[in-house]
Amino acid sequence: MTTTTAVTVLGLGNMGSAIAKTLVARGYRTTVWNRTASKNAPLVDAGATAAATAAEAVTASPLVVACLLDSTAVDEVLASVDSAVAGKVLVNLTSGSPAQARANERWAGERGAEYLDGKIMGDPPYIGTPNIMLPFSGSPTAFGAHEPMLRQLGTVAYHGEDAGAAAVEFMAQVAVGYEFLIGFLHTLRLVQAEGVDVAGFAERVAGSLAGYPPLLTSFGKAVKSGEYGPDLGSLDVQAALMDDMISHRESLGVEAVRMREVKELMDRRIADGHGDQGFSSLFELLAKRP
């Protein structure tokens, strides 16, 4: 398999349009298709070729990039192109689960196509810059052949042959963001209730984040090895803080469910005889109980 300068983009929402626009600007012969044909016009004006149907668009290029609304839209478009994907490389940049990515790979393989699953970690204005992250997984042959084109879109990382791995990376990183941010909002509510300037507090928290990378990597190593040192102090010591943390929140009318969950995990771990271990050891309790 060799690299190509011809590419098809299926789906011209904000993200798909940004992808197609970037590829046209970088000199790729770009064919575009969108269910609402009027969205083709700005790309055609920029130098792309519009296809009347998704199947026609797929036929036009050896490399096909799908960036659609959701997995249902992907299923509908793939059903409409079916055997036209034979001999092509299908790159799906639509949000979806690891299971969906693996199902798409099976679908493509049954029709003689190679499959790469990718996820876009950033906003449309950043397409084509290093500020957007794109994890990929799936066919190593396809990735190796088309990596130069993929790197036109942003900072790229290959996560292996399992087609679902990019979705795992995406969902996990997004989850970290949401978990952190909802916790941060809880603390903003707390300090505001105490009359503290929330903007100033936010600046101080931002300045403290440089200390987290070493802690995160140490947690990862502890979980992988199953050996939990007293990171952040032993659970016996940390647990002594929890009642005060919870009562402080509740006295101010601030929701304390998350902090109660942390206390419950600490108490269980200590009861199991692991009070000398650190916060990372709570990992052992996070599997869903039967």
Image (cartoon, rainbow, N blue to C red):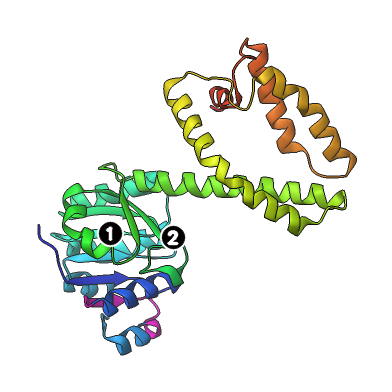
* Residue extent of the magenta highlight: 27-39
Q: Is residue 50 above or below residue 87?
A: below
Within 10 Å of the Cα at label 2, are there few (<14), some (14-19), or many (20+) other Cα atoms?
few
Image height of 150 relative to 139, above or below: below
In the image, what residue type sits under mark 2? Answer: Asp
Badge 1: how crowded within 10 Å, few (<14), some, or many (20+)? Answer: many
Q: Image point 39% across, 74% down: which residue?
A: 18
| Residue at numbered disc 2 | 70
Picture residue at 56% right of the left edge, 40% below the top: 212
Q: Position of residue 119 (x, y in %)?
A: 39, 55
Q: Is residue 34 magenta?
A: yes
Q: Quadrant of the C terminus?
A: top right
Looking at the image, which is closer to me, 103 or 271? Answer: 271
How far is the residue under mark 1 from the one under mark 2? 14 Å
* Rendered location of residue 44, percent (x, y): 30, 86
- Disc with the residue nearer the chain's start (1 vs 2): 2
Which element carries disc 2, helix, strand or loop?
loop
Write down the residue under mark 1: 91
Describe residue 50's horizontal placement relative to residue 197 as left or right: left
User: Which quarter of the image is occupied by the N terminus?
Assistant: bottom left
Residue closer to the observer: 142 or 101: 142
Residue 290 in view: no
